[in-house]
Amino acid sequence: PDLPRSRWLDDRDILGECVQAAKRNGIRIVGRLSIDAARTELAARHPDWFLVRKDGKMGQEIWAFEDGEPSPAVSMEYAPTCSFSTYFDEFVPQLIDEVMTRYKLDGVYTNGWPLSFVRPCYCDKCQKIGDPQSETYRLAYEKRIIDLVAIYNARVAKTNPDAIYAGNFGSATSVGNLDLKHLLKQSVWMFADNQGRHDGDSPSWDAAQQARVSRALIGDRPVIASTGGWFFHGTSWWR
């Protein structure tokens, strides 16, 4: 009940239809969950789920506005979640159980989480850990990510021993303050996806460099470099 269902779906289960069609054609399916945010309306029932800013307000304005202007890419109906909350160690495991059981997936990917940097939260629980800008908090945050990834790995494997869990270490090869060598010990692969969808300031060799850094981080486990190029509205784009 705490996972919103699109009003545009009516009674259809479009994911279920896609999974069945893919499996009929021998295609494996990894389900995507965006657990980095939740509907703000849930704050009435689960106020502890949400990231809190230093001024005590819900955190959605942190990433909903850029340079004081509204961002069209983000809905104010959603807000970032706190990684130390029960949302991550109680609700998300149940959600993984549900989608793995219902759809017989080959894996689960969490978009926007855990990332390669600390998202400081000033909720009561986080402030008891320490100053969210401190090294004490960073180390606790890193340990929390490792513990949660272990939980998600186990939940995915419970339904399908051959399935994988994959997180999103966004901008992992260029920014961040978490120890990726430490965090990646549980990872089965690394997928280097250059999200720069333009031809402005990213050199053409950037994707290959990401793959090389990924190889250094993850050793002899698989590394995949995702690249592409296209022409759109008179401009060449690539990623």
Image (cartoon, rainbow, N blue to C red):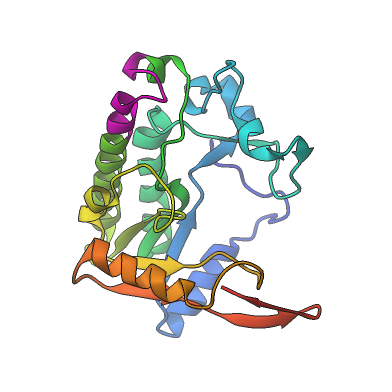
Q: Main secondary structure of the magenta part?
A: helix
Q: On the image, which quarter does residue 234 sit in? A: bottom right
Q: Which residues are magenta?
A: 128-141
In the image, residue 135 lies in the stretch drawn in magenta = yes
Q: Measuring 27% from the left and 73% from the top, which residue is drawn there?
A: 222
Q: Quadrant of the N terminus?
A: top right
Q: Measuring 29% from the left and 35% from the top, which residue is drawn there?
A: 144
Please state which of residues 56 and 175 is positioned toward the viewer in this rendering: 175
Q: On the image, which quarter does residue 55 sit in? A: top right
Q: Measuring 33% from the left and 33% from the top, which residue is drawn there?
A: 141
| 154 lies left or right of 212 | left
Q: On the image, which quarter does residue 30 sit in? A: bottom left
In the image, residue 1 lies in the stretch drawn in magenta = no
**Residue 40 sits above or below residue 239 on the image:** above
- Can the viewer see residue 106 in this picture? no
* Residue 111 on image: x %, y %: 48, 53
Please state which of residues 121 and 11 is positioned toward the viewer in this rendering: 121
* Residue 9 on image: x %, y %: 68, 56
